[in-house]
Amino acid sequence: MLRWRWCLHGGRPVSEPWLWITGLLTPVVLVVLGFYVYVEYQARLLKTHSGPIPGGLRFEAHGWSVEVQRSTQQLRVKTRLGHYTRQPLGGGDPQVQHGPLTATLPAPGLQIEVTQSVREGADGDTGKSTGLCNVVFRASDETAFALAEKPDGEHYLLRLEEVPAPVAAKFHQFAGQIRLWVDKLDRNLAQQMHLRAQRAEAEAAAQARAAARAQKAAEQPAVDDSDPEAQIAYWRKLAGFSGTSEVGYNQKGKIEWFIDLDKRGRITLHADGRTIYTTLMGATVTTLGGELEIGVRDDYWSEAEPELKHFRILKGAHSDVRRAWKERLEIMCDKLRSGEISVQ
């Protein structure tokens, strides 16, 4: 004979076998549900997402994320558990954070390391992998601050520990994209630093040339410019030749411009109170409204600094005279260029 029991709700009878079956299945259901929850939790721990965002890239994993900000040339790392150290470039006590934090790192010079965490073996044996990894970010303000001529700056060290190996492997691939971007930034900064150094060298060289010219001019003995013939004789003595010449005077009877050219391409020019003894090698000749402008190399000319010194002459001379001098000068420039004549 079956015996019936009344359930607590509704007053309907429930047989004892059903109670026995229910009691037997309940642990099984709980085990299945627990296993499902465990699998879901593990999947959540290993789940990652990466891709482009406005103005950069983003990698997201359980408990931490990395964001590339191209406009500011920075990396923003947010984590629930990290170890972050900031050390002033000029020395001093470091600032240390541990736990939940957000770190903003400069991209230039950034280094990212992904290493396996190994459990040490007994008796010096090779340790076994724990299945976890460490992700380390190293950065510094040194390069960017030096280019911008900013003081201070810091070194940065950020360590993320106990990162599951599958997650670390995916981030390692993402870090390759960051590396390409950082390499490009580093090349650009290096080029800018090189250009700055070149400009500084050029400015220093220009100052040295100006000082040398000023010293050379100061060392020249004074000549009475009220005697044009004595002045021309003095120039010819310094130049070491006497060639075909032309001279122009101002209203006071003093020399305003002067040109002296020999058959080997050597030339003496004087205009605007400046005098030069040089050659027509690499010179330029241009007609400018009733004058000739001659650009010549001085003693400090070089391929790296190919600046010419310009002199305007033949002001007030007849057009036929200017034309004849222009042709004479151009023929001499062509002969020097072709090697037909030599100034040596």
Image (cartoon, helix red, strand yellow):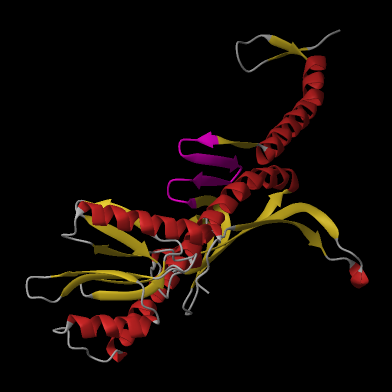
Q: Is residue 107 shown in magenta?
A: no
One can see residue 193 in this view: yes
Q: Position of residue 124 (x, y in %)?
A: 90, 71
Q: Residue at x 73, y 30 (%)?
A: 36
Q: Quadrant of residue 120?
A: bottom right
Q: Main secondary structure of the magenta part?
A: strand
Towards the viewer: 87 or 258: 258
Q: Residue at x 26, y 80 (%)?
A: 232
With 290 as the anchor, is 19 left or right in this view? right
What residue range appears in magenta?
A: 52-74
Q: Is residue 64 shown in magenta?
A: yes
Q: Quadrant of residue 157?
A: bottom right
One can see residue 152 in this view: no
Count of numbered badges drawn on the protein: 0
With 191 as the anchor, is 307 left or right in this view? left
244, above or below 26, in the image = below
Towards the viewer: 164 or 111: 111
Q: Position of residue 239 (x, y in %)?
A: 37, 80
Q: Residue at x 33, y 55 (%)?
A: 326
237, above or below 249, in the image = below
28, above or below 189, in the image = above
